[in-house]
Image (spheres, rainbow, N blue to C red):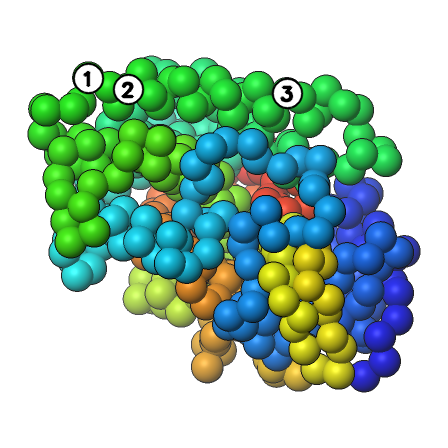
Amino acid sequence: MTMTQTPDTLHRILDYANRADPYPLYAELRKTPVARQEDGSYVISTYRELTDILHNPHLSSDIRNLARPMAAADGRATPAFINLDPPEHDRMRRMAMRHFGPPHTPGLVDGMRPDLTAIVSGLIDDLADKTQIDIVDDFAYPFPVTVICHLLGVPREDEPRFHQWVNAIIDAIDYDAKTDPPEKLSNGEQARKDIHAYLGGLLEPRHGKPGDDLLSRLANEDGPDGRMTDEEIISTANLLLIAGHETTVNLITNGMLTLLRHPQHLQRLRNEPDLIVPLVEELLRYEPPVHIIPWRAAYSDIAIADTVIPKGSQIMLMLASGSRDPDRFHDPDRFDPDRRDNQHLGFGSGIHLCFGGPLARLETQIALTELVRRLDKPRLVADPPPYRPSPVLRGPIHLHVEQG
């Protein structure tokens, strides 16, 4: 395996002009599984190499381990656990998981099924008389936002405020000093400060007042690891608020787009509702909500395939490319809900495997099942639809559908 530079291919992937279909470019990228870029960073694009490095103990998620500081570095005193390494990562993730899933609250997600179904049904009821709908604005956005607000204890009426902050933060994730205006970065930094202050204001009155929402539980309940500090609670809530809806919006929207492009599978799901479980897994492989982990760091030299990545190097992980790797998946560019051994990278892999994956799966299963069952002869208005700016969190910004 020869290490060569592939700057043009990567630049085209990041270019908005190719947002609607980056997959042919991923195929080009995979010709060099571990590719050094002009700036000294590394891009990894093949399934085997991605899984190897995601399970490598010398891969760091802590930005402080980069040899060169990044322009978009998050200056908060307490990073979210997704941006920490063991043992700090493991401790904070355990403390959050106590209130979110097994082993301490094993029935939480599945117990939400009736409420999730009721929210979905109400949203679709509102679409019944419309001949044209926007799957994003009318359904895929309000559904997970309602859910995560309820889980965290964030007032649903505050959604317009944090929607702006979240958009600014996501825009800053893929900031490029060479091409982007400085305000893109400064807007993201200000949004981080604003959302931090907002969540701090929600947290403060919850101390000493146990409740069912996650903010209240984190503020008042002790576990084997003790209790999170306020800064740790705020960073965790911030992560869940952003990741808890942005990725699910994309997953639901990508799912509906994929089904409308494959009407035979849409009809089959209508006739076989149990197909939804493997169908969502194939969707996570075929059109995932997260395409790229834009940076990781090597906190010592890392050998991947025949390449040694030096300590301190920035590493970009092309997850969506790995999930279309023909060396791992047969006929990878075909959407196949019957696919066996579907160990995709849609939720990542290793110690940072998506914390909210079980909830996102269930939300998407319910959403797509009910949309397919209840929409009347849905048809795409435009294909491809307009996409969000980000190459990292990739999905349509609107998905206009006609029915009836």
Above or below, 137 against 297 in this view is: above
Image quarter of residue 42: bottom right
Q: CA distance from mark 1 to mark 3?
A: 28 Å
Secondary structure beneath disc 1? Answer: helix
Residue linked to disc 3: 187
Q: Position of residue 263 (x, y in %)?
A: 54, 59
Measured as percent of width and height from the top left, residue 386 is found at 69, 37
Q: Which residue occupies 37% across, 58% down?
A: 87
For badge 2, the amino acid type reads: Leu
- Tell me if residue 290 can be seen: no
The circle drawn on residue 205 is: 1
For mark 2, what is the residue?
A: 202
- The answer for how far apart the CA atoms under marks 3 and 2 are is 23 Å
- Whether residues under marks 2 and 1 lie with C-beta atoms below 8 angstroms apart, the answer is yes
Which of 14 and 310 lies nearest the eye of the viewer?
310
Q: Amino acid at mark 3?
A: Asn
Q: Are marks 3 and 2 in contact (CB under 8 Å)?
A: no
